[in-house]
Image (spheres, rainbow, N blue to C red):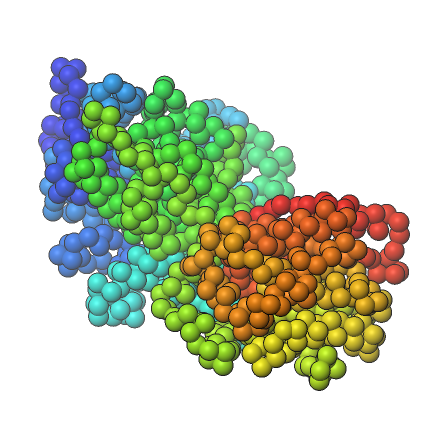
Amino acid sequence: MPEAMVAARESKAGDGTAQQVDVAVVGAGFAGLYLLHRLRKAGFTTIALEEAGDVGGTWYWNRYPGARCDIQTIDYSYTFDPELEAAWTWSEKYATQPEILRYLGFVADRYDLRRDIRFKTRVTEARWDEAAERWQLTTDNGAPVSCRHYIMATGCLSAPKPPEIDGVKDFKGEIYFTGRWPHDGVNLAGKRVAVIGTGSSAIQSIPLIAEQAAHLTVFQRTPNFALPAHNGPAPDDRMSLLQGDRAAYREQARQSMAGVPYPQQTVMSWQLSDAERRERFERAWAAGDLVHILTQLWADQAVDVDGNRIVQDLIREKIRAAVRDPETAAALMPDDHPFGAKRPCLDTNYYATYNRPNVTLVNLRQEPIKAITASGIATNGRSFDLDVIVFATGFDAMTGAIRAVHPITGRGGRSLTDVWAQGPQTYLGLTVEGFPNFFMITGPGSPSVLSNMAVSIEQHVDWVVDRLAALRDAGFTTMEPTETAQAGWARHMADCSMLTLHRLANTWYTGANVPGKVQGLMPYTGGVGPYRSICDEVTSRGMLGFRLTGPNGAAQCNDGEVVRLQPDVRLVLNLLATLNLPPIESMGAAGARAFVNEFNKGRPAGRPIGEIVDGTLPGADGPLTYRVFKPATAGPHPVVVYFHGGGWVLGDEQSDEPFCRDMVRRTGMMFVSIGYRHAPEHRFPAAAEDGYAATRWIAEHATELGGRPGPVLVAGWSAGGNIAAVSCQLARDRGGPEIAGQLLICPVTDCNFDRPSYNDNATGYFLTRSLMYWFWDIYCSPADRTDPRVSPLRGKVSGLPPAFVVTCEFDPLRDEGIAYAEAMAAAGVPVEQLKARGHFHSSFTMVDVVITGAPGRGQMAEALRRFAGPPPQVGSSDEHSRGHVSPGHKIAAAAS
């Protein structure tokens, strides 16, 4: 941009009269430029306020050596205008900062955006004027601004974090920050240079600085995972996909998890051999694609510690091979966080740089910095004389970028800084309760830094501008989230954080890099596509969670939480909905069995355990098949008799195999899954009598099966939970066997369909009310339904073994499961309850699909271990007392 044009923008001082606009935007980077374009097209008068001297945002300030994007530039681009895409061609797979800045300048020129930007202007205060229903902004350059809507397009990484080391002001040499690098460059030739930090900017700049400096000393506190970029022309395969069907390519990106069009990986790490895993890894390593290596190795790499550790170990092998000195190599290997839990870096010759004779690595974990002195840096072991210190210490991410701009005061004089004192609270990462007409682009609570920012920015801008236009067209003047919606989003954010391993690392994602900052995972981890669908759902449900007001007392408020399901449960149910499956009850018994068997073929098979043995046992009226799942540890093990789900109609001893495998691994117990008889061939009481007969036989033959003699445990899911409960009652009434405890997961306990959970969850959650009617009709005539062998809640519930009862919030059977637990507790049976918030009937058996079910299965395993008691050789009164549960004790917890 010509300097004369910049000067003209700066000179608009005005006479103190506020500039009146519909919308004010802070920032002129990727988000700010697209906002100006969209707002202008929607007919809003707009001004952008930008502290820098030109457009570019992050790419205006970050000019350090080696600065590049880490998303391929064909993906890290605007997609709103096909003509713009055709008019610009990137020169490299990962463009440098100068090229990205030229691109943003090209966009600004193409759409004549600079005429609505005030450069070198910083907002010093923003205050909501309740009487005028406008934001009043003061600036440090030019006229104040009065706007109806106020939008922060400040970026997530635009507030550099100041150094935290004593003596910075005493240093007599040159000091630079990677986030504020001089625009005319820095001459480091022949100088002694220190770089403090080994995050993304350091990893990109260190190889180039080492080529210039007489000597480079790198001060590293926390090593990071770095992957080779293998930069060059855009890869042919991705260019072919883009050019073959550009619209489809872009739409796949919008619906993907990371904002880049890669499919969801489905194979698990344990399903692959060592050779297969290594081949996948080597292919990804050679591709030089961050999103590929983060998402395409195996499905459990980002959600499971064991699956992730395999990737870590393979990367550490690469570091050992690249760095000649073993001590230096060891120091460069991360060991305190899962791969991907911190933002991995793309590098060019980073590890090889440490083989140069003019490069030294200082491990600050062994040798902390004491102070910066006039001549250099002193650690607790030595001193380094320096000419230049480069701080690559990162940013006060996400919240810092917003709060650092100015004080923001909302309704009732509330300060955003005070409201966020215990961490950011937002609705959708877009809005804040108490701050009407205030919006954030890629704010905390949105996918933002865990996504391709270009895709997330466009989605946010489109949603906000469309909402402002709809608000205007409907005659409303303010828009503000409700407290209920915001609190619900916070719960959903917490649920999403359980899906990945980000919670296991101290990073700038959590604010851990800023002293005194309240820590919590700030970006949304549920994925770009799912987040987009949630925003669309808010709109389709009448602006759910927003309060709209207008002239003469006009108001609209559709209060509520947009997401109450666990995030992975929501994904599963949405996927099932897209399949447009006919109701299971319409298939007939044979068709339903064939469907379930086929459906089960597509699920994860379950993790390895010690041994699986099939056999038959005598049932109530003929032989029954069973499958024994044994731990890998030496036996004998406590024995759990397990009954599968399926409404007394579907399934067999193998149908809940992933669940049985998982529980064997968690408990160290042997599970014996029973293939009891099914209706309609064998109606009531066949399943109940088979369950009791199998329990008795297994108890009598536990030693032969490899189990521990003594009391057995029983467990079951759904109709299997019904059989487990009934078996306990029959064992009590028929003289044994002795049962040490019962685990009932979403059990059928009564024939009453009038409880609220049947009405609240009648449709949409796979197990429907009509499907339960069908199950009951096939299994049991109405005259028999009050028999305790099918409705155990109608029977005697005292004198039963201790119970752990699991119910799910979105399950027709929820209330009868709770009623059974409460009835047992009232009768003096030791009972614990797990009321799983946000889960549906199948959550806990969908192992490695519904990840948020894992903590709940952990609680089930703990209960079974308590019921079984310690092994005889470990027994003590203390052990027994810790396993005891007092009568009626309940745990109401969310399995997330």
Q: Quadrant of the N terminus?
A: top left
Which residue occupies 41% across, 70% down? 583
Residue 442, quarter of picture: top left
Front-most of residues 583 and 780: 780
Q: Above or below — where is 147 with respect to 511?
A: above
Q: Residue 435: horizontal and vertical position, in percent? A: 33, 28
Q: Residue 655: horizontal and vertical position, in percent? A: 58, 74
Q: Residue 658: horizontal and vertical position, in percent? A: 59, 69
Q: Residue 550: in sight, yes or no?
A: yes
- Classify residue 171 as left or right of residue 132: right
Q: Above or below — where is 769 with respect to 686?
A: above
Q: Residue 141: in sight, yes or no?
A: no
Q: Above or below — where is 428 with respect to 124?
A: below
Which residue occupies 52% across, 37% down? 519
Front-most of residues 725 and 66: 725
Which residue occupies 70% across, 75% down? 690
Front-most of residues 692 and 98: 692
Residue found at the very far front of the displayed protein: 783
- Classify residue 269 as left or right of residue 634: left
Q: Residue 726: horizontal and vertical position, in percent? A: 70, 65
Which residue occupies 79% across, 51% down? 883
Instruction: Give the total number of marks visible in the rendering.
Output: 0
- Classify residue 329 as left or right of residue 871: left
Residue found at the very far top of the displayed protein: 15
